Amino acid sequence: MSDTPRDTYARNDLTTPTRDKERAAWDRDAVHAVLDAGYLCHLGFVRDGAPVVLPTLYARVGERLYIHGSTGSRPLRGARDEQGLAVCVTVTHLDGLVLAKSAFNHSVNYRSVVAHGTAHQVTDPEELRIALDAIVEQVAPGRAADCRPGNAKELAATAVIRLELDQVSAKSRTGDVVDDEADLDLPYWAGVVPVAPVYGTPQASPHSDLPLPGYLAGPTC
């Protein structure tokens, strides 16, 4: 893969939605912004002829997604082979419930990314450490340097697959309700209910008597 930055990703049948095409974006910054705002993805693949979708953790490093798993996981085992594993990875953030005056015009405000490609298991020890640190950082920035790194036994029991960001696009909806003209005077409330993740107060383990780290004291933790 070239290390030369690209302004946009290629458009093709896999990366172009069939509905609401105006909501799609292929520019690199838009895709990265959605990916960098989360840490939970859904990994889709085909197993024994049937579709399977699994939730798991991920991190973006440059133009690669690293996806966490176990060495006993079926998709991770499939990614060991030289040909790799065909996958579809999705990331979605729900930003609002859009409640219209008609049931048909209800919607949601959201940001999402869909990435297609062939995933390969990370086997290089140094790349594996980089990937696992990145996944920890994606969940809690600052945490990778504030915990014991994995030892040889733990690394042997952990698998990470790598997906190059090549066939990828973002899609989003923002804004207000779109009601039909004929419905505007109907006696029903309409509007947007904002949705955002909420982090509670960190609760220390009985085995931890240290002050709360600064990276957990911010507004999102």
Image (tube, rainbow, N blue to C red):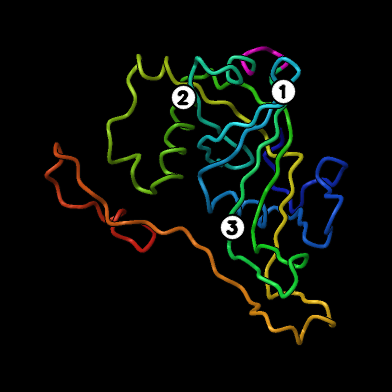
Provide residue 128's location: percent of width, then percent of height: 48, 25
Which part of the image, by quadrant, shows the C terminus? bottom left
Mark closer to the chain start, 3 or 2: 3
What is the C-alpha distance between the residues marked 1 and 2?
Answer: 30 Å
Amino acid at dot 2: Glu
What is the C-alpha distance between the residues marked 3 and 2?
Answer: 35 Å
Classify 57 as above or below 142: above
Classify 113 as above or below 154: below
Classify 98 as above or below 78: below
User: Hey, which residue is sitting farthest left in the picture?
Assistant: 209
- Residue 30 picture quarter: bottom right
Q: Which residue is mark 2?
A: 126
Of circles 1 and 2, which is in front?
1
Mark closer to the chain start, 1 or 3: 1
Q: Secondary structure at mark 3?
A: strand
| Residue segment shown in magenta | 79-83
